Structure formats: structure tokens, C-alpha cells
Image: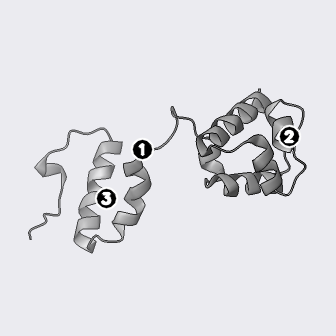
Amino acid sequence: MYEDFFADRLSELRAKKNVSAREMSLALGQNASYINCIENRKAFPSMQLFFYICEYLGITPQEFFSTPDTEDSRSKKELPQSLYQLTEVQLSLLSQLVESFCEKEALSAENISVHYRE
């Protein structure tokens, strides 16, 4: 089951990068048929080689296992960085807003105790 997913995902990501299995194998310092063996379910990489594969593909291990159905949207990936640009008041408001969503309460002006004025 996991071997099939791994092989298919590797093949998909390699094709997106537009490199041959042979080219990728050699770039990873392996024999020319190494990636082909993985994609044909005859081999499975070590953890160290898996990290090298991810580095070669320019992705994180989490991204390797994320499929279009499970991938975070771009805004979710960018959100943590944009939080550093907020003031303490803005962070407090945002925190209250998120808590409100998590509690599945109807969001209204009364739910937010801190008011932000520019």
C-alpha cells in the first residue's frame, strides 16, 4: 500500500520536475537504475536517501506525502510568515477570531472584546 503510494508519488513529482529516472538517480549518487527500481516497486529508499530525494525535488518530506486532496492552500503556507508583521493588538484580535471559529460560534462584534482602531 505505502510502497505503491511512494512509487507513484515519486514518479509524479519527478515528471513535474521534467527529469528522467536515470538523470535523477545519477544526481543522487546512485546507480543509473535506482529511481526506476523504486518507481517499479523493486526497491525502497533509506530515510537518508528519502531526504536527498526531497531535497533534489525541492520539496519537504511533508510535501512529498501531501497530495492535491491534502495539500494546504498557499494562503495557509504564507499565513505564519505574515503573522510576524502584525501588531500585538492585531494578533489579539486574530486570536479571538480564530477561537470563535474553533468554537463554531457566530462571529459578531460582541464576541470580540478588543476593538482595533487605526
How many numbered dots are placed on residues in this image?
Answer: 3
Q: Is residue 112 left or right of residue 98?
A: left
Measured as percent of width and height from the top left, residue 48 is found at: 82, 57
Q: Quadrant location of the N terminus?
A: top right
* Residue denoted by label 1: 73
- The residue shown at (11%, 50%) is 109
Query: Marks 1 and 2, Cα distance to the nearest angstrom?
Result: 30 Å
Quarter of the view holding residue 89: bottom left
* Picture layout, residue 83 above or below residue 32: below
Measured as percent of width and height from the top left, residue 33 is found at: 87, 41
Question: Are dots 3 and 2 in contact, CB under 8 Å?
Answer: no
Viewer-proximal residue among 69 and 49: 49
Q: Quadrant location of the C terminus?
A: bottom left
Q: Earlier in the sequence, mark 3 or mark 1?
A: 1
Q: Earlier in the sequence, mark 1 or mark 2?
A: 2
Q: Amino acid at mark 3?
A: Ser
